[in-house]
Image (tube, rainbow, N blue to C red):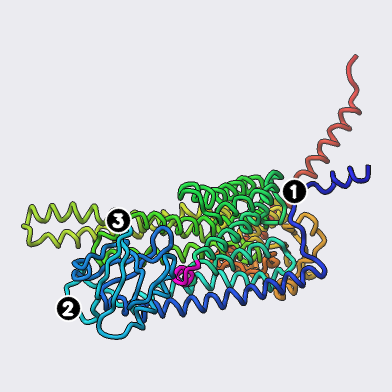
Amino acid sequence: MGKAGASRRDPWPPVALPAVVGGISGRVRHAWLALLVLVAAIQVAGLGFVFYDAYRINPALHRIGISLEFDDDDRPAVKPLRRDIVAAGVGAGDRIVSVAGRRFAVDASALSIERAIIAAPGDTVALGIRKPGGREIHVLASRSSRAPLLTAPNPMSVNLRMAIRLASTLLCSAALLGSSVVLWLRRPRDPEAFLFGIGFLGIAASVDPPLLMWLSIGASRVIDIVTGLWWIVLTIALAAFPDGRFTPPWLRWSLVAAPVLGLILIVDRLGNVTTLVIGIGVPLMLLATQIARYRRLEPGTKRQQIKWAALGFSAGFLLVGLSAVMALAPYQSWSVALGGAWVLGIVCLFNLGFAAMPLGLLISLIRYRLWDVDRIISRSVAYTVLTSGFGLLWALLSDIAKQIVAALLGQDHAVLGLALGAIVTAGIFLPTQHLVLQWSKRRFNRSSVDLERLPERLRVWRERCDAADVATRALDVAMRALHASAGAVFARTPAGRALLARHSAAADAGAAPVTADAARAGGGHIVHLEDQDGLAGWMVLMPRDDGSRFPRADLAALDAAAGPLARALRVAAPARQHDTAMLTLLDEVQQRLAKLEQQTTRPA
């Protein structure tokens, strides 16, 4: 019976991640720190190799008219750059099997071949080339050949390309490593934070810049293994997000399914479609379950945590997916300038995608600025709609105006149509911008709209409610908009002050004090309810649970409502007193009429 009861109390797989406590937490934290230092060293080594590849390897290969690219098996293959190399029989996809008489194995790394080419003496380098069919040819590649290039050189300088690439790379690295460091410092005992922190380190060890280093030294299996491992831990962490409990309960089987699927990804014997379905489809399914859980939750911290995580993952998947779609384009056949810019865009979007994922999760897990996500979403949607819409509108109007101007004034004045289109678009921009921003605010941030409308609503409330009711309604609007942890409204009296309304966001915090001193010390806000007749009272708002500051725009809207609220409190109090007196008088009249009816003699 005892064992049966224990099995019912502790199901397997468990319904929640085990907490890291006691001595285990110290060992786990030390291992986490060691892995953090190791990945940071890998990042530095990868960054150094990127510079070595750009400024030493590539120039040396280009001097003999070739470059090396990685095929589907992650092996280095030749790409000819000069016409004399093609005339010697070298084609795209051929492999180098010897350099200056030194023989290389079939699985030789790209770095060993490149270093042999750099170290080869003389003005020519003897290359042994193996064709796809197995036939070998020998080519003398000159370092000083004047043979024409197959394509024009890239007009974008190496320094500019490196600066753009490194900007996105360093942002990705800082987001991944920085998120893991913050989680290590702020949430050392949280299993969710541990899994996400380890997953971020795994991503940092397998993407740019270490990615090129692993491929060049022939360690592509390291990429497969590390990718499979971080996929496993992130999948389990997503299933238990945000409180470490698997909700719905069947998600606890991710503890079994994730390692099995991760091992399949590591073995990498499946097709690309199956790999994409597992690698991207499973996290997307878990994200969908979080959205369903979000809809069932009441407004609060967990709901905002899920929203921030969904924002980070959605932005990350969107950018990474866009880079994957761009990689399918036939950019190899484009011009060098366009193709080079396209490849650079793929790398930047890929890096930015992996930077967005940890940032959203980091804010969610450390519970910082949880309540600002609605404002970010509303502005992003508004500016996206404006940018895309006005771009299309300008193109359409410019084309129409250009055709009209060309028909009236001739083709020499067609440029005037572009100016006319821009003028019309600019005239439409400002009013449309206001409408779109208001729509997005109403759609994603309704509480801020209610706060802005508070002065006009106070004019109605003061005619129908007493002072306490007006204060309660105004306090509810302010707390919903600013997400304060607690708040109160006090009326100024000859003896000091009187409490009109008090509210707390937490159900069990009814006795928590709401004072001006506590609000000032904790980062809250005090509104002086003052109009032309003087000070009528105060509204005290306690700081948010996540410790973040109140948005300036909402504070400005609240301060703008201070005067109307003061006026409403002055008007509502005597009106309510008059209503109370009238009701008392009516009650007294009714009582006297009832006594008269009882004393009157009724006819037989």
- Residue 68: x percent and y percent? 35, 69
Q: Which residue position is annotated with label 3?
A: 330
Residue 146 circle label = 2
Which segment did they paint magenta? Answer: 211-219
Q: Position of residue 27 (x, y in %)?
A: 76, 72
Q: Quadrant of the N terminus?
A: top right
Q: Secondary structure at mark 3?
A: loop
Left-right relation of 472 to 321: right
Amino acid carrying mark 1 in the image: Pro
Q: Which mark is residue 176?
A: none
From what the image shows, is residue 595 above or below residue 542? above
Q: Residue furthest top?
A: 604
Badge 1 local density, few (<14 within 10 Å), some, or many (20+)? some
Which quadrant would residue 160 be assigned to in this image? Answer: bottom left
**Disc 3 and disc 2: Cα gap in Å?**
29 Å
Judge from the rendering whether residue 45 lies leftward or rightward of residue 263; answer left or right.
left
Q: Quadrant of residue 524?
A: bottom right
Q: Is residue 61 above or below residue 591?
A: below
Q: Are marks 3 and 1 in contact (CB under 8 Å)?
A: no
Between residue 296 and residue 582, name the one nearer to us: 296
Task: Tell me if 382 is positioned left or right of 229 in this view.
Answer: left
- Tag 1 residue: 13
List x then y, in percent, for residue 346: 39, 63
Q: Specify whether residue 27 is in view.
A: yes
Q: Is residue 110 above or below residue 461?
A: below
Asked if the residue under mark 2 is in contact with the one under mark 1, i.e. CB atoms within 8 Å, the reply is: no
Marked residue nearer the N-terminal end (1 or 2): 1
Disc 2 residue type (three-letter): Arg
Q: Residue furthest right?
A: 1
Q: Is residue 348 magenta?
A: no
Residue ID at (46%, 58%): 320
Foreground label between 1 and 2:
2
